[in-house]
Image (cartoon, rainbow, N blue to C red):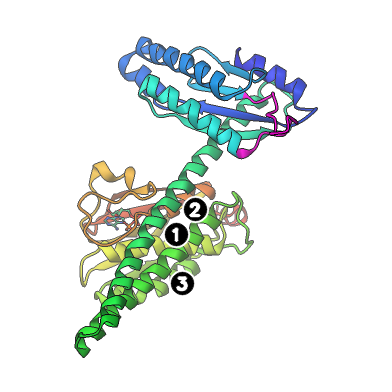
Amino acid sequence: MYIAELARALCFEVPMRPVPLLALRLPQLERIAWREGKRAAQRLERSAARAFLKGARQSLRSGDLLAHDADSDVFVAAALAAPRNADGCERMPTALDCRSALSRIAAGMSIATGLSIETGWTLVRKIERESDLATEVATALERGLREQERYEFFATVGHELRTPLTSIRGYLETLLDGGVDRSTARRFLQTARREALRLGRLVDTMFEFSLLDLSSAPLDATVPDLSRTAAAACEIVSQTASARGITVLNRTQSVSLGGLDEDACLQALVNLLDNAIKYGRDNGTVQIGMERDGPFVRIAVEDDGPGIAAVDRDKIFGLRVRGAGTERPGTGIGLAIVRMIAERAGGEISVVESSLGGAKFELLLPVRAESATAAS
Ligand code: ADP
């Protein structure tokens, strides 16, 4: 059926009970239509539609409704028929039911088309107009992306935690076996301690990341002032900077930021400054500055390191992504956190070349409404 027909059916069903809505999208279809022509995209869309029908018939129940519009990259299923318990009683579909049906249907569509499939589900509790369905589909897909991101994050952290643990265990076992002279034993203990500290930092990042994702609105009402938060961030990184003889210049001014709390703002600035120091030259300079850009402020964190190759500039904000040829240790998580903070605040993050010779990260954040009016 068409998506509008499904919306009409849901307007009738949802007032009686909430209905799980499963959404699948082929994000590459639009680019294929543009690059290889509409026909190529339509061929893939038809294969996807056949695989969608086949997968949905195998994974869903006969009373469930399936919808897709021609020339659209979205496929939707409404799980109207309730699954049954072992004793034959009807029950509400669970998150697990939805996720496993989605992954089976998506696997079939991906095999049939060779394309990647975005998936997600949501429980529709209210739908008054046909157009409300588009919002529900967007919610489902957005939620699916977040789930996927979280899954990847914990898989990465699990993997990252194992490395320091293995090395700590190795050093301790060698020491317990005995036969190691005093100075070597001390070196082993120092290395084990360093690894334990790194483990602690990874765990901290893990909590920050999961908390950041809990809500789309800032929890704390503390309004960050840019120059105050930048000064606090410079203080936090000062030890690391001075260990490498790096001068950190704070050229920000007082402006109240909107859309995020002070902790999130501090976290974003520390991550950017940490990187600038990590990738900057020994005895070099790192600078944090700002300029007003309409209702936004553009915060720039610059360094004199190797900079970022043009091909990497969009990718490095992805979770677990590290630049090609990066030799310094890291997890590829810091910039993903900055991007999440920026997007939640209604801003964005990007990187260009710095006049200092290295990278210039530009964090665009909204200025708080009252101070925006006061300034203009
Ligand atoms: P990590 O530094 O732990 O790898 P990030 O998410 O903070 O993770 O950064 C992702 C990648 O971006 C890094 O691996 C590095 O290649 C690149 N990068 C980040 N900041 C800089 C910088 N200031 N100069 C050069 N490369 C950088």
Residue contact at pointers 1 and 2, CB within 8 angstroms: yes
Q: Where is residue 309 shown, x and y percent of the image? A: 23, 47
Q: Is residue 221 visible?
A: yes
Magenta residues, dominant SS class: loop
Residue sitting at x 24%, y 64%: 280
- Whichever of callouts 1 and 3 sits on the residue coming sooner in the sequence is 3
How far is the residue under mark 1 from the one under mark 3? 12 Å
Circle 3: residue type:
Ala
Other residues around mark 2 within 10 Å, as few (<14) / some (14–19) / many (≥20): many
Helix or strand or loop: what does disc 2 sit on? helix
Helix or strand or loop: what does disc 1 sit on? helix
Note whether 176 is above or below 32 in the view shown: below
Q: Nearer the viewer, residue 71 or 181?
A: 181
Q: Nearer the viewer, residue 197 or 256?
A: 197
- Whichever of callouts 2 and 3 sits on the residue coming sooner in the sequence is 3
How far is the residue under mark 1 from the one under mark 2? 7 Å
Q: Nearer the viewer, residue 272 or 137?
A: 137
Q: Which residue is mark 1?
A: 268
Quadrant in which the N terminus appears: top right
Q: Which residue is mark 3?
A: 232
The stretch of residues the image draws in magenta is 78-95
- Res 301 quadrant in image: bottom left
Q: Nearer the viewer, mark 1 or mark 3?
A: 1
Q: Residue furthest top?
A: 39
Report the side of 63 relative to 117 (left or right). Answer: right
Residue sitting at x 48%, y 21%: 73
Q: Is residue 347 visible?
A: no
Q: Which mark is residue 341?
A: 2
